[in-house]
Amino acid sequence: MRTFILPVRGPFSLAASTRFLEGFAPAAFDERAGQPLELAFPVDGIWQTAGVRVREHADGVEGEIVSPEAPGAELLGAVRDQVARILSLDVDGSGFPAVGERDPVVAGLQRRYPGLRPVGFWSPYEAAAWAIIGARIRIRQAAAIKARMAGELGEPVSFGGRALSAFPAPQRLASLDGFPGLTGRKPEWLRSLAVAALDGRLDAARLRALPAEEALAQLRELPGIGDFSAELVLLRGAGAPDEVPRHESRLARAVALAYHRPEPPTADELARISGNWRPYRTWTTLLLRAYLEDETGEIAGRPPGGRA
């Protein structure tokens, strides 16, 4: 078996996920219009590189493993779980419309971005690596370095007419001496990160099973990972669906813009507002961030309204 079906519970659009990835700098994603979503990544815990083609399906979403050619049952199950987490299909979204019923601002965002759920990093390991690569440099510069690392150190996957290079697996980064663009202690931090991944400390299921504060505290123990990066790894790497990042300044500005507030909310005000978003606080923050980027174009450098 090389295919699997992911059932969809609640609103979801694979096309919306693909459009989001086109503006998601860490993915360096350039998809062909109207084509299936193609992903290449090291498989969590197994760390073998896999290539997956994802399509809409009458029963949900279909995934087809194109590499390796003969995946065993363990690899198939791990890839299935990882794709489900990347697309937030491991969460029952049938209650998400009720958030819009409680909060008219969220209702407007749901109408503007129908079926959009958080699209995560391919793994907590890759999210943490992105945080280290991107520390103290511009997002677009970090994306270019990450893409070059994939091209030079990662494994390529053939999807017929084109090849995609996966981000290097942790066993490759564990021996990293340096790489163009990685300054200061970043190579050392990436080596430590790779060892942590191989030891299971970045396992997504384990991180999500912990109380959020405990998971964040453990992530902050990793060299090069601070408060902001720990939240990134938990929310966008492990896919925790109901957390609010407290060290993400863009979220406060997005809330001010969407809720027509003269100033960004304080931490207490944000906690009160986000209480209505439960149990999908992470999902709602994603819609707010997408809205902020559409209105400002500050990350991609596009004119306002430049993203579909």
Image (cartoon, rainbow, N blue to C red):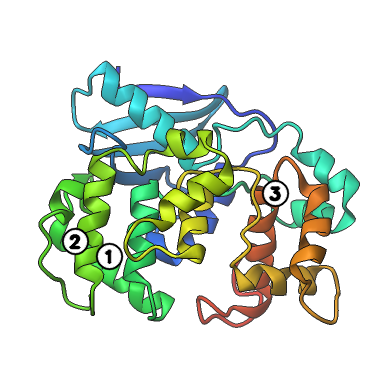
Residue 147 bears which disc, if any? 1
Task: Indicate which disc residue 281 carries.
Answer: 3
Q: Quadrant of residue 263?
A: bottom right
**Cβ atoms under marks 2 and 1 closer than 8 Å:** yes
172 or 15, nearer to the observer: 172
The C terminus: image quadrant: bottom right
| Quadrant, the N terminus | top left
Figure quadrant of residue 240: top right
Check disc 1 and report its element: helix, strand or loop: helix
How far is mark 2 from mark 1, CA to CA? 6 Å
Report crowding for label 1: few under 14, some 14 to 19, many 20 or more residues within 10 A (C-alpha). some
Mark 1 or 3, which is nearer the eye? 3
Residue 191 vs residue 204: left or right? left
Q: Amino acid at mark 1?
A: Ala
Task: Give, as a three-letter code, the residue at label 3.
Answer: Arg
* Of 172 and 19, the residue lying toward us: 172
Q: Residue at x 65, y 49 (%)?
A: 283
Q: Position of residue 249 (x, y in %)?
A: 62, 73
Q: Is residue 32 visible?
A: no
| Residue named by callout 2 | 151
